[in-house]
Each structure stands twice: as C-alpha cells, then as structure tokens.
Amino acid sequence: MARILMVLSGSDHWTLSDGTRHPTGYWAEEFAVPHRTFRKAGLDVQISTPGGVRPTVDQVSLSPDRAGGEERAAELRSYLESIDDELAHPLPLEDAAGRSGDYDAVFIPGGHAPMEDLPTNAALGSVLADLWNSHRLVAAICHGPAGLLAGNREDGSWLFAGSRLTAFTDEEERQAGLADRAPWLLEDRLRERGAIFEAGPPWQPYVVVDGDLLTGQNPASSEDAAKRAVEMLGALQR
C-alpha cells in the first residue's frame, strides 16, 4: 500500500505587506477532495503540520458561494467532521522529516496559509529533498507550491529549478483581491527561483506533471490532481 504525507500549514493567517493578518488556513476543497480520493484508492494517508498543531480551515472556503453551493459546502463540512480526530492530532512535520523514507509521496494543499509558514520550513525542506532525490512523488496545488520553496540543495540552489509547474497565478490573486497587499506573489517567486511556470485560464482546472512533480493551479484542480497522483502512485507500486 502506497503511503502519502499530506502537509498542511499550521498557520491561521497570512501577514500582508501592511502588517495586518489576513485570516485564512487550508482551503477545504483542496484538502478534503484529495484526502477522500486517496482513501478511496486505498492509500495510507498521514496528515502532518509544523509542530503538530491542529490545522485551521479557511472558513471562506466553506461558504456556499465559494464552495459551489449550499449542498457542496455541507458535504465538505461533513467530510471534515468525519475525520476530525485525524485533523486534531496531525503528525509533527519535524517527526515526518525523520522518517521520510516511509512515504511514497508528499501532497501539499493550498489556501493562503502555506504562504505564511511553509516556504522556509526546514522540516518540509528535508522531506522534499529526500523524496525528490529518490524519485518519489512531490505534489502541491494552488498556494501549496509555496511549500516547494523550502526545498533547497546543500549549495542553496532550489530543488525544482528548471521544472515545469503551476500554482495559483498572479492574475487569480488579483481577481481574488489580495494581490495589492501581498508581501509577495507566488507565481512571481516561483519564476524567480527558476520554475518553468505554466498557467491555464483563471479558476479552471489545470494540472502539470513534470517527471515526479505534480502541481495543480487552483481549487478547481483538486480532483484532477488527486486522481493523477493516484495513477502515478499506482504505476510506482507495479
């Protein structure tokens, strides 16, 4: 059975350029849909956060207008409630780093929270380096690729320089209304570090696979990214 480490941010806010804290967390769809997809496929899923703190769901992601209607919002809430014990007791990311050989893949959902605490997280960087260097699957969606910024080689160069990938785009950030107050923009930073950034139409599903790297652009990409991850892990197990 393939084992996948789902890394969630431990932050409940994103510090904006004016110093104010924008309340946030993980985006419900980007976590719940892949988690459920992985479990249905028979994968062993371990939730992990920095320090083992309980992750915060971005309440905006559970509002009917952002979740896709009342029924969809209720479905997401119900699923999160059904795995509440797992969410309440995540594996400390520092512990996961010490046993990264146990995992066949890492998957990082988004929400704005990863922008706050994952790009410089040394434990995540260790996990990413171990998996990437041993040709195991590294996956992230929306703002989750902010966590990829933690993955550096010993010489300081970025693990994913020269890789094709996608993430929440600058245009989507502008349309979401936070670009003007963001301390930095994810697409810009990924390009600066050497990513070959690809983008589909705003808010539409878009997934990029480059070798062992799988990335999705936005919340709408959650299901496609999760299904592709399952396919890739199935091939790995054969």
Image (tube, helix red, strand yellow):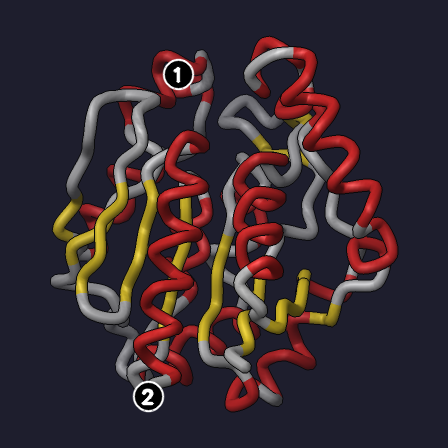
Which residue is at 59% across, 20% downward? 67
Name the one closer to the observer, 190 or 74. Answer: 74
Callout 2: few (<14), some (14-19), or many (20+) C-alpha neighbours within 10 Å? few
The quarter of the picture where residue 230 lies is bottom left
| Mark 1 residue crowding within 10 angstroms, few (<14) / some (14–19) / many (20+) | few
Q: Residue at x 12, y 51 (%)?
A: 196
For residue 193, above or below residue 111: below
What number is the disc on residue 134?
A: 2
Quadrant where the C terminus is found in the figure: bottom left
Check disc 1 and give the amino acid type: Asp
Q: Nearer the viewer, residue 74 or 153?
A: 74
Q: Is residue 128 left or right of residue 153?
A: right
Q: How far apart are the two marked residues, 2 and 1, measured between alpha carbons?
A: 39 Å
Question: Which x, y percent locates residue 213?
Answer: 28, 64
Q: Amino acid at mark 2?
A: Ser
Vertical relation: 172 (above or below) 43: above
Task: Please name the residue that numbered disc 1 is placed on.
Answer: 180
Image coordinates for residue 183, horizontal then vertical, percent: 44, 32
Report the quarter where the N terminus lies: bottom right
Residue in view at x 57 percent, y 35 percent: 29
Q: Report whether 174 appears left or right of 69.
A: left
In the displayed structure image, the side of residue 111 where residue 196 appears, left or right: left
N-terminal of the two: label 2 or label 1?
2
**For numbered disc 2, what is the local secondary structure?**
loop
Q: In terms of image quadrants, where is residue 162?
A: bottom left
Question: How many discs mark residues in the rendered view?
Answer: 2
